[in-house]
Image (tube, coloured by chain):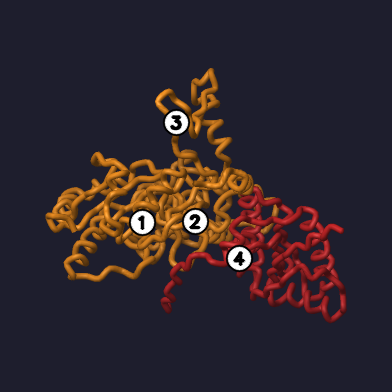
Chain colours: A orange, B red
């Protein structure tokens, strides 16, 4: 508690796009409740703050910390560890913090290849082949930047997490409901869910909330929404569009499939599912309409990027986590810290 | 003397055909390497790809999936589902850098003890040649964070 008696609130972005912060601001007038009930002490995207200010705070002094983004480099890990010490309730906020999200798709490739693409491919005009170095001896002294990890991690692979709030980004209504719950719990009017719970989401699947008509599924071939005009009322998967709905936790009111776009699985696996992509592969493969291995292969050719399609936002949280070359690079890299 | 690498292979067999084939191989005293650890499922269609990934992530060097021949499934057509899942899973594993030879689908009827034994022998040698998989999560996989169990809601 601060001098004004308000509990403290912090929000941080690790390897993230900033969409989670926008989703928080998108709770509209409820943001005033956040301000009325919390003192915002650290939120790099919204206000100026220095890491040393956070370091100076007493441990456990931040009541609620929403941490979004994956753990991609040494800075992300450092701040995650710091905020874990300072916060009472640490929430893995958004798909990236929960299961690695989009940044974790780089677990299919090595840091070397990533830097190569970013700095030496056609996307960058870099005739002198300049590459950022982790440390640089400037006239004023040594300059150091965080170093990139080969294997992108989810937040709970670095520090213990109290709650998971999935979504890319989490839906604003869900954020508002969670904020309301925490405020009530602080006043003693409600109890918080047990530690480790998934909050701000349902316990069923996206299909359960999806209004599209469903029949017996038989897939003769996979296609994509840019290749034809899908029937607006019929299940997308039945039309050969790889929709992640069957394996994805609900809580988003099936927004994407309702709008005609396939679910990408951002709410993560349902309760009891250990590996999101495996469950989705199980569901999707079983309805392929062929018993002939060659035809099955031909139908599967319609999915050009299997890992990218089945682990869109979940690779760091999957069982294998990263590809073999990525793990090898990680193991050969200098030990972290 | 250098030690010979002994691969660990997890074998998923179906109750009605391939597990009985393994049984027959035993009764017939057919020899096959002890590197395979058989796990009986009711049907190859029960095989969730999670099982294969968990085996590999926990330290197995290979996985054999076996079931009734196509068209002979005890549950009519569930082995076709196993086949479709296998083809998709193989593509995923290839993209993850796992050699294709590490996961294999073998059909074996209850009468094919000899066939199953020879397929196991063949696969053990193939995986031995590939070397250990040593997936880096192997040590940690035993201590996977507990995920909440799904709530069973009776229909």
Label 4 vs label 1, nearer the camera = 1
Q: Provide residue B90's location: percent of width, then percent of height.
A: 65, 53
Q: In the rendered image, which residue does mark 2 sit on?
A: A317
The label on residue B51 is 4
Q: In the rendered image, which residue does mark 1 sit on?
A: A84
Q: Residues within 10 Å of mark 4 (few under 14, many from 20)?
A: some
Name the element at disc 2.
helix
Disc nearer the start of the sequence (2/1): 1
Would you say B114 lies left or right of A74 here?
A: right
- Image height of A143 relative to A11, above or below: above
Q: In the rendered image, which residue does mark 3 sit on?
A: A142
Q: Nearer the viewer, residue A262 or A129?
A: A129
Question: Label 2 near label 4: C-beta < 8 Å?
Answer: no
The span from disc 4 to disc 3 (Cα, nearest Å) is 49 Å
Instruction: Please name the residue shown 69% across and 62% down the image.
Output: B63
The chain identifier of the residue carrying mark 3 reads A
């Amino acid at each position: 508690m601060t001098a004004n008696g308000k509990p403290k609130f912090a929000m941080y972005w690790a390897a993230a796009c900033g969409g989670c912060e926008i989703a928080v601001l998108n709770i509209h007038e409820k943001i005033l409740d956040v301000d009325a009930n919390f003192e915002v002490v650290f939120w790099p995207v919204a206000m100026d703050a220095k890491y040393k200010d956070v370091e100076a705070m007493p441990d456990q002094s931040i009541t609620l910390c929403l941490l979004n983004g994956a753990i991609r480099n040494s800075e992300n890990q450092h701040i995650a560890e710091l905020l874990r010490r300072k916060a009472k309730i640490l929430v893995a906020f958004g798909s990236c913090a929960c299961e690695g999200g989009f940044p974790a798709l780089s677990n299919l490739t090595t840091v070397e290849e990533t830097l190569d693409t970013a700095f030496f491919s056609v996307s960058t005009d870099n005739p002198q082949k300049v590459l950022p170095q982790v440390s640089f001896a400037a006239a004023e002294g040594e300059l150091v930047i965080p170093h990139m990890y080969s294997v992108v991690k989810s937040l709970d692979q670095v520090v213990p997490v109290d709650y998971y709030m999935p979504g890319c980004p989490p839906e604003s209504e869900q954020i508002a409901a969670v904020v309301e719950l925490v405020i009530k719990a602080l006043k003693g009017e409600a109890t918080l869910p047990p530690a480790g719970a998934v909050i701000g989401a349902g316990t069923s699947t996206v299909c359960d909330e999806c209004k599209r008509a469903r029949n017996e599924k038989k897939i003769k071939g996979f296609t994509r929404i840019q290749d034809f005009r899908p029937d607006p009322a019929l299940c997308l998967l039945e039309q050969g569009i790889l929709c992640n709905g069957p394996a994805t936790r609900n809580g988003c009111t099936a927004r994407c499939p309702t709008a005609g776009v396939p679910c990408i699985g951002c709410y993560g696996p349902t309760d009891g599912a250990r590996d999101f992509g495996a469950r989705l592969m199980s569901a999707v493969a079983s309805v392929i309409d062929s018993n002939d291995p060659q035809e099955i292969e031909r139908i599967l050719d319609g999915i050009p990027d299997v890992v990218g399609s089945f682990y869109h936002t979940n690779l760091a949280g999957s069982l294998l986590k990263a590809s073999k070359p990525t793990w090898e690079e990680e193991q050969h890299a200098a030990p972290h810290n | 003397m250098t030690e010979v690498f002994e691969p660990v292979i997890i074998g998923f067999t179906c109750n009605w055909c391939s597990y009985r084939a393994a049984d027959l191989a035993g009764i017939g005293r057919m020899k096959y390497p002890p590197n395979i650890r058989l796990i009986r499922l009711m049907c190859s269609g029960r095989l969730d790809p999670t099982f294969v990934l968990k085996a590999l992530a926990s330290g197995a060097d290979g996985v054999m999936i076996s079931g009734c021949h196509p068209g002979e499934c005890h549950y009519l057509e569930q082995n076709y589902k196993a086949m479709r899942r296998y083809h998709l899973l193989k593509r995923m594993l290839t993209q993850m850098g796992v050699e294709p030879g590490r996961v294999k689908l073998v059909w074996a009827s209850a009468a094919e003890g000899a066939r199953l034994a020879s397929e196991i022998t063949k696969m053990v040698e193939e995986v031995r040649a590939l070397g250990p998989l040593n997936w880096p999560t192997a040590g940690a996989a035993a201590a996977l964070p507990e995920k909440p169990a799904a709530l069973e809601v009776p229909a």
